[in-house]
């Protein structure tokens, strides 16, 4: 079997197009321009790249982008004060604090200081609780992007066996909640799971969010299953230089799976598209305007 490639890059471009249309309508009908504030503390090179592309795409869909770059030794008080200021700023509908933060800053405290309704990353404890109890919340961007691709590919997910490998707060756990919300039978696997290959083999849907390059081989995949590869790992090429690979071994998985997301060009682009979708959703909710239903869970 040769798997269908789920083209996250093309899907993300469509999502951004839909967001841009809604943003244009908000402006024309209500004179509202959604605003996304991104806070970067320190000079982590990967974070700088992410923040730059988030800012560029925010502007491309017609939203206002507010970037706040703080020194690596910024005090917790100064950072919390900035977040409070953004919480109270009516021009700001979404706030994202780029993680990881330097070690002297308490990540949980910082995230939980963001107003939940502006928490476009969906990491605030209130949003975690709302998602866990099946209520309307801000949904973490990466799992939301995975869910959108799965719904697009399968239509209904009801009754499917889903195995999520990884139990992090930002990917694994919210992914499992979303799949449960769509009536999958969900297993969350992690580093202590016994006989991981057998667990994965029963899945109709495998979401790999481990952070280990090419860890999931094709012979763990049930023929015809869908593989969503969240991993982003940089490895050395045999002829020098580096390349990006996922947590699934693409070639062997693609030979067995029914569908698979590539790395790069799968989950990654959907994450930023969902950040923009969440900012739009937050703006609609803040202004009591109907939100686009297909852009959230
Ligand atoms: P974490 O390191 O926070 O979590 C990794 C999870 O994988 C843990 O739950 C860990 O289990 C589990 N794990 C580690 N080793 C094994 C193993 N041998 N067998 C089974 N489970 C294992 O990572 P994240 O969730 O933050 O990210 C996962 C991957 O996704 C990374 O490659 C990251 O770069 C990528 N990512 C991609 C994004 C995108 O936009 N595409 C966004 C966010 C992340 P335990 O809890 O027991 O330690």
Image (cartoon, rainbow, N blue to C red):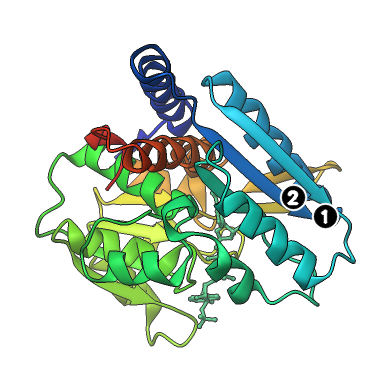
User: Residue 39, how many percent across, how many down?
Assistant: 70, 50
Q: Is residue 91 left or right of residue 149?
A: right
Mark 1 touching mark 2, by CB under 8 A?
Answer: yes
User: Residue 65, how many percent across, how many down?
Assistant: 64, 32
Q: Quadrant of residue 239?
A: top right
Q: Residue at x 12, y 45 (%)?
A: 156
Q: Secondary structure at mark 1?
A: loop
Near-viewer residue (81 or 118)? 81
In the rendered image, the residue lying farthest to the top is: 28
- Specify the label residue 171 is tagged with: none
Residue where numbered disc 1 is placed: 44
Q: Is residue 73 placed above or below 42 in the rendered structure?
A: below
Disc 1 residue crowd, few under 14, some 14–19, many 20+, Cα 10 Å: some
Near-viewer residue (114 or 103)? 114
Near-viewer residue (12 or 232)? 12
Near-viewer residue (170 or 134)? 134
Disc 2 residue crowd, few under 14, some 14–19, many 20+, Cα 10 Å: some
Q: Secondary structure at mark 2?
A: helix
User: Residue 238, how many percent across, how many down?
Assistant: 79, 47
Q: Is residue 20 left or right of residue 211?
A: left
Residue where numbered disc 2 is placed: 47
User: Residue 144, how many percent across, how many down?
Assistant: 37, 49
Q: Residue at x 36, y 21 (%)?
A: 22
Query: Is the residue at mark 1 in contact range of ligand 1, meaning its CB lies under 8 Å from it?
Result: no
* Total marks in image: 2
Query: Is residue 232 something one can see in this rendering?
Result: no
């Amino acid at each position: 079997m040769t798997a269908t490639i789920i083209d996250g890059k093309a899907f993300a471009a469509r999502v951004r197009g839909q967001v841009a249309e809604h943003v244009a309508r908000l402006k024309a009908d209500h004179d509202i321009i959604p605003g996304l504030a991104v806070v970067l503390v320190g000079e982590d090179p990967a974070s700088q790249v992410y923040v730059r592309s988030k800012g560029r795409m925010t502007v491309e869909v017609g939203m206002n982008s507010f970037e706040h770059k703080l020194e690596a030794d910024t005090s917790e008080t100064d950072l919390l004060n900035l977040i409070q200021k953004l919480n109270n700023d009516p021009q700001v509908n979404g706030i994202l604090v780029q993680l990881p933060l330097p070690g002297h800053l308490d990540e949980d405290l910082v995230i939980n200081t963001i107003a939940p309704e502006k928490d476009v990353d969906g990491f605030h404890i209130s949003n975690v609780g709302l998602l866990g109890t099946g209520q309307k919340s801000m949904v973490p961007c990466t799992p939301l992007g995975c869910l959108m691709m799965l719904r697009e590919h399968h239509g209904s997910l009801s009754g499917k066996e889903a195995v999520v490998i990884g139990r992090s707060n930002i990917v694994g756990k919210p992914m499992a909640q979303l799949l449960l919300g769509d009536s999958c039978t969900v297993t969350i696997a992690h580093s202590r799971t016994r006989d991981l290959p057998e667990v994965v083999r029963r899945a109709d849907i495998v979401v790999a969010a481990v952070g280990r390059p090419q860890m999931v081989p094709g012979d763990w995949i049930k023929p015809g299953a869908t593989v969503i590869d969240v991993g982003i790992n940089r490895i050395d090429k045999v002829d020098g230089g580096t390349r990006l690979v996922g947590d699934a071994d693409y070639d062997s998985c693609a030979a067995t799976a029914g569908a698979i997301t590539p790395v790069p060009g799968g989950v990654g682009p959907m994450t930023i598209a969902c950040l923009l979708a969440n900012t739009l959703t937050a703006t609609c909710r803040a202004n009591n305007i109907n939100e686009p239903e297909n852009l959230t869970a």
